[in-house]
Image (cartoon, rainbow, N blue to C red):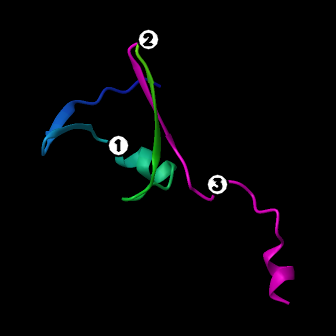
Amino acid sequence: MVKFRKVIKTGNSLAITIPAKTISDFSLKEGDMAEVLVNKTKTAITYRFTGHPRQLSLIDKKRNLE
């Protein structure tokens, strides 16, 4: 799905806001890290958010508590 966002000025930088639904869908919060991938030939910037517990744990938490 294509969505458009306006580039805004914040201090001496420019920013693009993230829609509230996307924040909720990805469980993002202030301070999370994002990997920034810049492709100048395609004029594209991709953000990859990392550090979220979206993978299944390989450790059985119940078993470790016993």
Residue labelled with disc 1: 19
Residue 6 in the figure: left or right of residue 41: left
Q: Could you tell me which quadrant the C terminus lies in?
A: bottom right
Tell me the quarter of the picture where residue 38 sits. top left
The residue sitting at 44% across, 55% down in the picture is: 32
| Cα–Cα gap, marks 2 and 3 | 30 Å
Residue labelled with disc 2: 42
The secondary structure type at the circle numbered 1 is loop
The correct choice, above or below, for 58 with respect to 17 in the image is below
Mark 2 nearby-residue class (10 Å; few <14, some 14–19, many ≥20): few
Q: Earlier in the sequence, mark 1 or mark 3?
A: 1
Residue 26 in the figure: left or right of residue 21: right
> Callout 2, which amino acid?
Lys
Name the front one of labels 2 and 1: 2
The correct choice, above or below, for 20 with respect to 36 in the image is below
The secondary structure type at the circle numbered 2 is loop
* Disc assigned to residue 54: 3
Residue stretch rendered in magenta on the structure: 42-66
Observer-nearest residue: 26 or 49? 49
| Magenta run includes residue 40 | no
The residue sitting at 37% across, 27% down in the picture is: 3
Q: Earlier in the sequence, mark 2 or mark 1?
A: 1
